[in-house]
Amino acid sequence: MRREATVSHLGKTTTLHIHSDTHLRAPALPAIERAFLYMGVFLAPYATLRFSELFFTLSDFFFCLSLSLLFITGRIWSKPLGEATPLWLIAFTLLFVGLMVGSLLHDSPERGLIVTAQYLFAYVFLMFILIRDEPRVAYRLAAIFLVSMVVIDIHGIITFYTVGYVPGEGKGVVTGGRRLATVLRNPNLAAAMNALTLPIPLFLWAAGRIKSYVALPVIAIFIGTVILTSSNSGLFVTLLCLGVFTAFLSTPKLLLRLALAGGILAAAVAGFGSKDLLPKTFQTRVLGALSSGDISEAGTFVSRAALIEEALQTISDKQIAFVGLGADEFRERSVQTAPVHNLYLLLWVEGGLLALLGWIMFSAVLLLHGLTLKRGGGDKRALAAMTTTIVVFLTIALFNPHMYARYWTIPIFLCCGLGLAQFRQTERFRRRGA
């Protein structure tokens, strides 16, 4: 607190002004909040850095700090998805009610609260934390998450070829079957995360935010990592991502860039490559199934198909409609004591059609938000990134159980933020032109 005396120009009155130093400290809070936010986004893929078995990670800790400072400074954006925000909250309500009603009726309210709290954090809290009305922050967040994934992939590739599998360390960076799991400790998850993040560098490249000499190596690292994971589902969603993004834009500039990348890759394969250069595990798990046409050779297909059959049988036997078995109950009742690796069926079994409808509504609301931005003059490339991410996300859900880990939803919200950032820039250019 400092005091400052000023005298009027007539010299007749003296006024005492008391200035608080609060206004000097206030700008520091947003900067601190953004630092917490950036740390949370960078650490999001490192889900093994957790405090307990309840899946509360170091990244979540920084997100909580960021959210707290947003409240303190009054900077929470009430409608991050615009007019679609209430629909998003309705979708979560349906998911919450479906899972909780089933859990309450089957005497497992604790599990219901734990699972729905995880979904609340991943699908609601992160929406308010990550989607900002600040274009520069949106680009930084996307770049930070992209750098984090690239660091993970480079570390994994180096470990794969220099260290390999280390017996006795549990789930390591490389599995005993010579599959790259990265620090995510799961080959299929590592491949899926690369596919889900791939629209970010594709968008930044198409928008001219990064040059070809940066974009091409990043994309090559992503594809190389997917190959080393020897994941059939991961390879499928990666190819789907590239196909959807390319088809959505199909601009001459993008097609020229992709043709250049394809030409370089084709020349490298023709000059130096052969099937023997690919990892042996990839040849047996992926190429073996593709060449023989026998899908049963594609990794764990048989056991997962049995879980899907069991889930369908449970839905039929229990006549599950709007009320399911409750959160995590399928795992308890399954012959394999495992959740069905199909989120659509899992939500139907455990949360009934209410939970399933709520989860599907999430993607529908995002598409609606993207179309709203496009009609308002938003960037087509940003809409392509949003749509591609949603399509990949929905496809990944066909091969996974509950998807409440934060690294699943962060790429989606980041692409929404990029779409909004492009929209804001377009608006500014229009105003200047007017």
Image (tube, helix red, strand yellow):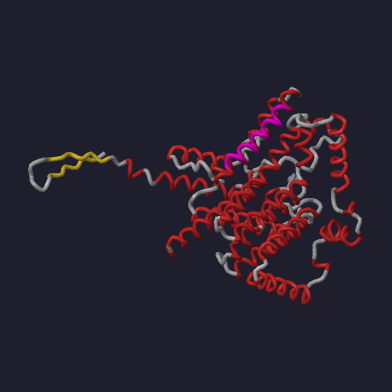
- Residue 140 shows in the view: no
Question: What is the magenta segment's predominant secondary structure?
Answer: helix
Check if residue 96 falls in the magenta segment.
yes
Quadrant of res 271: bottom right
Q: Position of residue 203 (x, y in %)?
A: 61, 61
The residue at the point 49 percent across, 38 percent down is 68
Q: Quadrant of the N terminus?
A: top left
Where, quadrant-wise, is the C terminus in this rendering? bottom left
Please tell me whether residue 227 belongs to the stretch shown in magenta. Answer: no
In the depicted structure, whether residue 181 falls above or below residue 311: below
Q: Position of residue 355 (x, y in %)?
A: 71, 35
Residue 428 in view (yes/no) = yes
The structure residue drawn at horizontal position 74% and vertical position 74%, both measured from the top left corner, is: 268
Image quadrant in which you'd find residue 97: top right
The magenta segment is 85-101
Left or right relative to 337: residue 114: left
* Residue nearer the viewer, 320 or 2: 320
Up-down: is 53 above or below 368?
above
For residue 367, above or below residue 308: below
Viewed as shown, does residue 64 lie left or right of 330?
A: left
Name the foreground residue: 19 vs 105: 105
On the image, the x and y values in percent for residue 238 come to: 73, 58
Q: Position of residue 153 (x, y in %)?
A: 67, 57
Where is residue 115, by image quadrant? Answer: top right
Q: Which residue is drawn at the image coordinates 72% and 40% (left, top)? A: 402
Asked if residue 266 is positioned above or below residue 6 in the image, the reply reads below
The mark total stands at: 0
In the image, 3: left or right of 397? Answer: left
